[in-house]
Amino acid sequence: MALYAIGDLHLSLTANKSMEVFGAGWENYTERLRQSLSQLGEEDTIVLAGDTSWGMSLEEAEADLRFLGQMPGRKILLKGNHDYWWNTVSKMRKFLEEKGIENIEFLHNNCFTYGEYAICGTRGWFWEEEQGAQDAKVLNRELGRLETSLKAAGDREKLVFLHYPPLYQGYQCPEILQLLQKYGVKRCWYGHLHGGGCRLARTGNWEGITFSLISADHLEFVPKKICE
């Protein structure tokens, strides 16, 4: 039994938006994901850190969700900026139940336990988004979701997963970083960055928190083992 993580699968079995147009690094990525995900065991858990499917609706994302459902192990999904199919948790759960997909869950205003750990997280927010009143509104909403998740963890060690990086070269999201420090978080994983942008990621230790980039192309489409 082990816990894994990977982000930004950008599956497109129905939406016809293959990431292969972005270069050789994405060549045959769906099959590469199939091969690596199929190596997980039924007792394993994998966190998918956003941008899972290019589908514009649950119906359009069905093939991608079914693809994941056919892979072994428990999947915990959080929202990314391109997950346009994302809906209320109740609607997503009902959709999966109707389609007979039983091993996918959603990290949204909650947390999940894994042994002595708590799996916490939310989408987060990022400097490249448009600034203004709407930016503040969305950031505050994400801060609330992250704190709800961290509170739900209680005294367990908190493993935090975000889609957007809270640290980037020349940028920090102080509000998110302060929350991580407030709740004693020691490890945080994030995605969103691709290609050349991965070189600008801030990884390693920052103020006692270890940050790791887990976008799929950065990991060469092989999930990262977090713990056993």
Image (tube, rainbow, N blue to C red):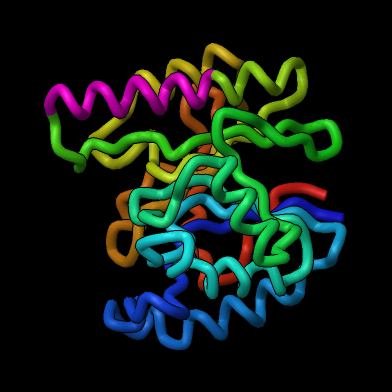
Residue at image coords 42%, 56%: 85
* Residue 211, percent from left and from top: 51, 39
Taking 178 as reference, is 95 above or below it?
A: below
Drawn side of residue 55 relative to residue 155, left or right: left
Q: Nearer the viewer, residue 157 or 55?
A: 55
In the picture, measured across the screen, residue 208 lies left or right of residue 59, that is right
* Residue 46 image position (x, y, % from top left): 68, 55
Q: Quadrant of the N terminus?
A: bottom right
Name the foreground residue: 101 vs 219.
101
Magenta stretch: give its range: 132-147
The image position of residue 17, as x and y in percent, is: 32, 77
Residue 158 placed where, x, y %? 67, 28
Residue 227 highlighted magenta (yes or no)? no
Residue at 12 percent of width and 26 percent of height: 132
Decide: is 66 above or below 208: below
Query: As rendered, which of 20 and 106 lies closer to the eye?
Result: 106
Q: Is residue 209 left or right of residue 13?
A: right
Q: In this view of the protein, which residue sits in the foreground, 36 or 142?
A: 142
For image coordinates 15% across by 22% down, the residue present is 133
